Image (cartoon, rainbow, N blue to C red):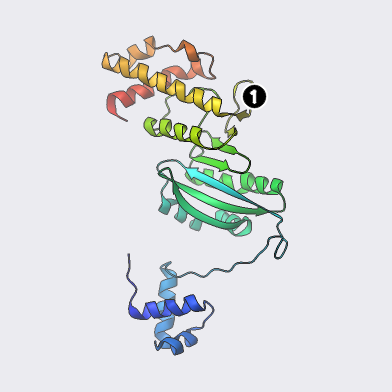
């Protein structure tokens, strides 16, 4: 943190009144030497403490370039920080281009303890906005923050997009290497409490199904909680790892996608958690 000196405060106050004011004009109005104004103003700009914005109304009420606008709420999982998000958007020229061309307004917020982006996206139509978002914006965020790190909700359409975070009535993939189990379970509970009707996952479900519902999330969560309880018991009995993998079966969930392939790895992951807290 840096505290502005009195001359810097005077310069900033004048620029708030009129961002187009020249150095000469600021000097005359504040009594600060013109060369000092130029030097201090440039320093404030380089430090990122002073920035200028221009707003052009491209909506149907203004220049009529765009006829539709959607609000997107994109929530990142634990581990993505505010500074990381800001820095990567600033340094990635492709993301800067997308933000200036298609996004009317953006905010970084905190939702349920996680960093989130609130974006007002402009387009020629509802379909144009969906295509721009999924073809241009989302791929850049996935590249920088991981293909399983995003949860996106479209409030108007009551749709959530969960990428690889949740399967459609399926088991978790192998040993869930990049997952902290309490966060995963807690996030699933919060997703169930959100207002949505349809879910798009990063991979199709059984039979090629593309769209999921809250029933899918509930089944996924119940599977994880039941498996956690079974592995906890096995850990207390000294059976992790080999004994637990050999003995634990969950017939209730044997028809879930990936059950045969992933159960052993899922058990191993929960053994890690109940044995070592990781």
Q: Position of residue 162 (x, y in %)?
A: 54, 36
Q: Where is residue 252 in the image (x, y as percent from the top left)?
A: 48, 13
Q: Residue at x 53, y 18 (%)?
A: 256
Q: Where is residue 21 in the image (x, y as percent from the top left)?
A: 52, 82
Q: Is mark 1 on a helix, strand or loop?
A: helix
- Asked whether 187 or 171 is in front, the reply is 187
- Vertical position of residue 228 compared to residue 116: above or below: above
- Vertical position of residue 263 compared to residue 6: above or below: above
Q: Where is residue 6 in the image (x, y as percent from the top left)?
A: 34, 79
- Vertical position of residue 60 compared to residue 201: above or below: below
Q: Which residue is drawn at 31% across and 24% down?
A: 274
Q: Please name the residue that numbered disc 1 is placed on.
A: 208
Quarter occupied by residue 212 = top right
- Asked whether 118 or 128 is in front, the reply is 118
Q: Which residue is drawn at 51% across and 38% down?
A: 147
The C terminus is located in which quarter? top left
- Whether residue 92 appears in this view of the structure is no
- Asked whether 75 or 93 is in front, the reply is 75
Q: Residue at x 71, y 65 (%)?
A: 63
207 lies left or right of 89: right
96 lies left or right of 31: right
Numbered disc total: 1
The N terminus is located in which quarter? bottom left
The residue carrying pointer 1 sits among few (fewer than 14), some (14 to 19) or many (20 or more) residues within 10 Å by Cα, namely few
- Whether residue 12 appears in this view of the structure is yes
């Amino acid at each position: 943190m840096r505290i502005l000196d009195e001359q810097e405060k005077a310069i900033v106050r004048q620029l708030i009144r009129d961002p187009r004011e020249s150095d000469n004009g600021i000097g005359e109005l504040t009594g600060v030497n013109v060369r000092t104004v130029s030097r201090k103003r440039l320093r404030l700009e380089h430090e990122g403490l002073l920035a200028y914005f221009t707003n052009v109304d491209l909506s149907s009420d203004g220049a009529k370039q765009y006829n539709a606008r959607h609000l997107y709420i994109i929530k990142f999982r634990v581990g993505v920080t505010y500074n990381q998000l800001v820095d990567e958007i600033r340094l990635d020229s492709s993301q800067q281009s997308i933000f200036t061309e298609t996004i009317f307004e953006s905010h970084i917020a905190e939702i349920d303890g996680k960093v989130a982006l609130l974006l007002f996206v402009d387009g020629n139509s509802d379909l144009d906005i969906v295509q721009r978002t999924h073809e241009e914006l989302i791929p850049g965020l996935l590249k920088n923050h991981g293909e399983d790190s995003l949860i996106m909700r479209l409030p108007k359409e009551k749709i959530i997009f969960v990428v690889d975070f949740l399967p459609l009535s399926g088991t978790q993939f192998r040993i869930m290497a990049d997952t902290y189990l309490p966060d995963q379970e807690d996030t699933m509970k919060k997703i169930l409490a959100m207002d949505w009707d349809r879910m798009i996952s990063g991979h199709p479900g059984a039979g090629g199904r593309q769209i999921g519902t809250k029933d899918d999330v509930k089944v996924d969560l119940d599977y994880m909680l039941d498996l956690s309880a079974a592995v906890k018991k096995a850990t207390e009995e000294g059976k992790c790892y080999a004994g637990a993998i050999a003995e634990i079966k969950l017939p209730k969930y044997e028809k879930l996608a990936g059950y045969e392939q992933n159960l052993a790895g899922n058990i191993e992951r929960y053994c890690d958690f109940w044995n070592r807290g990781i």
